[in-house]
Image (tube, rainbow, N blue to C red):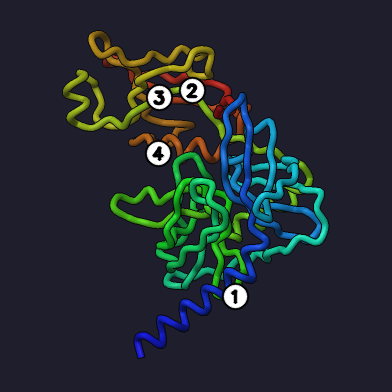
Amino acid sequence: MAASAAASQTFAAQVLYERAAPAVALVRTLQEDRQGTGSAFAISRDGWVLTAAHVVRRAERISAEFEVGRRVPARLVGYDARRDVALLRVDTAGLPSLRLAEPSGVQVGEPVAVIGNPGGRPKVLTTGVVLDVGLTLPGLVPGILIRVSAAVAPGSSGGPVLNARGEVVGVVVAVSARPGAEGGLAVSSAAVAQVLPSLMAGARVERAWIGILGTTVTPELARERGLSVQRGVLVVEVVPEAPADRAGLRPDVANGMPGDVIVALNGRPVDTMEDLLALLAEHQPGDRVRLRVVRGSGAFDVELVLGVRP
């Protein structure tokens, strides 16, 4: 009985692969003489192609390979870095295409398959289940991610997560960041559908940035560096000419004075680096924000205009 069930699952995965794989492409990028690879998939027969924003956002040249050995140029139409999704256009008619699942269509425990190009190898399928929904990565819009147990490796970003009907329930954006966990993270089809019209219109949405390298303040760190607070984000480095630099934030010096500690943004508490990134994800570049900063035994407010995350 168990052998029969395993054979049935293998057959179902094979049928799903044969149906969906022709719509999946190996993406090749070129940026300042650096080559990269990723995954993508067609969502229409007339050349609309979805991928992850981080795969193509800064590329000078992009190509898509739907058939092994046959590359076609791809044009970046729009992207949303806050959701890590991008839309490409290829001048190829009659593409096999995949359909986005209904916004409410993914459930924990649901079987899924991922088709991607790990390490540049074309169209590898892995299977698993949905482990969690409504997750967040630092810097992305909160609650838009799903986590799957299907194996995901670098090069699979931008590939589809498919349900048993062959519908796209997510776009792969990362290997799972959960300690000891296999699988990967994907932007849900609901989040993709929400921004698809704006991507087709050419929107280019960037992530907001203040230009620091920071670390979460712990009681141990506070004792070690002589900080007057035991929560917040210690400014370790400040990027030259970044918003934080122009606002006068002071970085930490290991053998000298401790750096500034950010404890609030627009009046909302910042206890950890994750808190700071989550609050920044709610803003756009160009927004003016107010930081509450602790320096030594004193505290002050500083305003800065958010920049674009490189």
Mark 1 or 3 closer to N-term?
1
| Badge 1 vs badge 2, beta-carbon distance below 8 Å | no
Bin the neighbour count of mark 2 within 10 Å (Cα to Cα): few under 14, some 14-19, many 20 and up. Answer: many
Q: Secondary structure at mark 4?
A: helix
What amino acid is found at the position of numbered circle 2 in the picture?
Gly
Identified at 69% across, 42% down, the residue is 63
Residue placed under numbered mark 3 in the picture: 213
Mark 4 or 2 closer to N-term?
2
What amino acid is found at the position of numbered circle 4 in the picture?
Asp
How far apart marks 1 and 3 lie (CA) works out to 44 Å
Residue 124, image x and y in percent? Answer: 52, 59
Pick out the residue farthest to the bottom. 1
Residue placed under numbered mark 1 in the picture: 165
Q: Secondary structure at mark 3?
A: strand
Residue placed under numbered mark 2 in the picture: 211
Q: Is residue 4 left or right of residue 102?
A: left
Residue 15, image x and y in percent? Answer: 58, 75
